[in-house]
Amino acid sequence: MLTFHTCDVFTDRAFAGNPLAIVLGADGLSSAQMQTLAREFNLSETIYVMAPRDPAHTARVRIFFPTAEIPFAGHPTIGCAIHLASAGETGDFDKRVHSARRAAWRDGRS
C-alpha cells in the first residue's frame, strides 16, 4: 500500500495556494504507474519519493504532470521538502535534473 499526502504550497490555509500530491515509498512503481497515478490525482504536479541512491541524501524524487514526467519544478520540490522536514526527515533532499543537482534541505534554522 502506498502512502500519499496532498498539500497546498505557497499558502497558509487549506484549499488555497498550489496543490500537490506527495507519494511516499514509491520505489516499486514503474514510470507508467507513476504517470497513471499522476493522471488520477489530476493536480498540477505529483511528486514521488523514493529511497536515495546516495546514502548521504535523504530521498530521491520524480515529478509528474498529469500528462508527462518533468525534470524539475519548484513548487513540488519545496512542498515535498517541507513535508519531509515536518515529518522529521533531515539532511539533503536530492533531485537530479539531467546532470545538474538541485537540493533543498532543512538544517534546523528558521
Image (cartoon, rainbow, N blue to C red):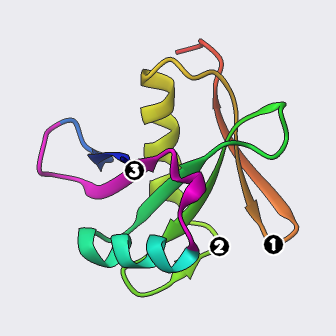
Q: What residue type is disc 1 on?
A: His
Where does the image place residue 35, in percent across and percent down from the top left? 44, 78
Q: Residue at x 33, y 56 (%)?
A: 20
Residue 42 visible, this orientation: no
Disc 2: which residue: 71
Q: Is residue 29 above or below residue 106?
A: below
Q: Which residues are magenta?
A: 13-30
Say which element carries label 2.
loop
Is the Cβ of the residue at disc 1 closer than 8 Å to that at disc 2? Answer: yes
Horizontal relation, residue 45 to residue 57: left or right: left
Q: Residue at x 26, y 57 (%)?
A: 19
Picture disc at residue 98? 1
Q: Earlier in the sequence, mark 1 or mark 3?
A: 3
- Disc 2 crowd rating (10 Å Cα; few below 14, some 14-19, many 20+) is few
Count of numbered tags: 3
Q: What residue type is disc 2 on?
A: Pro
Please tell me in which quadrant of the rendered image residue 5 appears. top left
Say which element carries label 1.
loop
Horizontal relation, residue 31 to residue 13: left or right: right
Is residue 29 on the magenta stretch? yes
Picture disc at residue 22? 3
Q: What residue type is disc 3 on?
A: Ile
Residue nearest the viewer, comparing 41 with 25: 25
- Cα distance in 3D space between marks 1 and 2: 7 Å
